[in-house]
Amino acid sequence: MKQKLTCLAFAFLLLAAFGCGTSEDPDNGIKDVEMQTGTLQGEVESIEGIPIQVRLLKAGQLVAQIETDGSYELGDLEVGDYTIEISAKGFETVQANATVVAGETVSLDKVTLVALAEPVSHIRGVLTDSETGDALSDVLVQLMGKTGEEYEALTTKDGVFSFENLPVDQAFTLTVMHKGYEDSQIDVDPITANDTFELDVELTAIPEPVKLDPGQGLSIGSQAPAFELPDGSGKVHALADYLDNKNVVIVFYRGGW
């Protein structure tokens, strides 16, 4: 009996030892996953009556944008190297490099913007759903000058986008492409010095394709619903992609049997 108790006690000690060694591993694994993001924060000397734009780029791509009147914070960022651009109407743009560290908040040096000497122009707008009127956030808005310059902005949670310090007396083309919506392109006439061109942009949602029940058809003369169909090679085509340009003829054919 004593020998059995000794064996059981020894086995219990082994289990306890291994259990203590492994019980923390799952937690550590979870923490490793959770800690793969970090935060950047900083401060810009406020400018009375002028909002300040903070843009965050990674490998040259715009990934976040916020509007502030002083302090700013960008959270839930993937670890890695970034470039921060800080701008305001009539002031020089400041760039700074920053590295996001997992699980940490990195504080950046305070920035003071310097007024521009040359005249500039600006564009500011709001992006909404044409049917609901809801603001569309985190949408990329692209602007191209007639001489080839390209600019990008992301809409805020209120659908606001802005481009500061643009060349004066130059025409632009503004383009918005957003999944689930028709593309929108707007020509902007030349803007005079120190003026801001304001516009409202509405995107029209693309109707969901209609699914007909087996055997259900359309009567002659009725309007075709939005639909998608594969061609002979399996590539899917949407009716909406063709209606703006030309009349559409749909030909159904049998396979090779």
Image: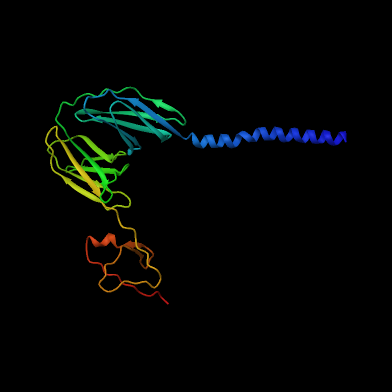
Can you say whether 5 is above or below 227 in the image?
above
Q: Residue at x 72, y 36 (%)?
A: 15
Q: Residue furthest front?
A: 132
Towards the viewer: 255 or 140: 140
Q: Nearer the viewer, residue 211 or 153?
A: 211
Position of 8 with respect to 235 (left or right) is right
Q: Quadrant of residue 91?
A: top left
Front residue (pair 218, 173): 218
Q: Position of residue 4 (x, y in %)?
A: 85, 36
Quadrant of the rendered image containing residue 13: top right
Q: Residue at x 28, y 41 (%)?
A: 159
User: On the picture, is 216 further left or further right than 94?
Assistant: right
| Relative image position of residue 5 (x, y in whole percent) | 83, 34
Count of marks, rendered view: 0
**Point 38% across, 29% down: residue:** 40
Q: Quadrant of the N terminus?
A: top right
Please, which residue is most extreme toward the right here?
1
Task: Look at the picture and state if 114 lies above or below 214.
Answer: above
Q: Is residue 36 left or right of residue 246?
A: right
Q: Position of residue 126 (x, y in %)?
A: 24, 41
**Percent position of residue 69, x then y:** 28, 27
Give the colour scheme shown: rainbow
At horizontal 28% and vertical 59% (from top left) the residue drawn is 241
**Horizontal relation, residue 27 to residue 166: left or right:** right
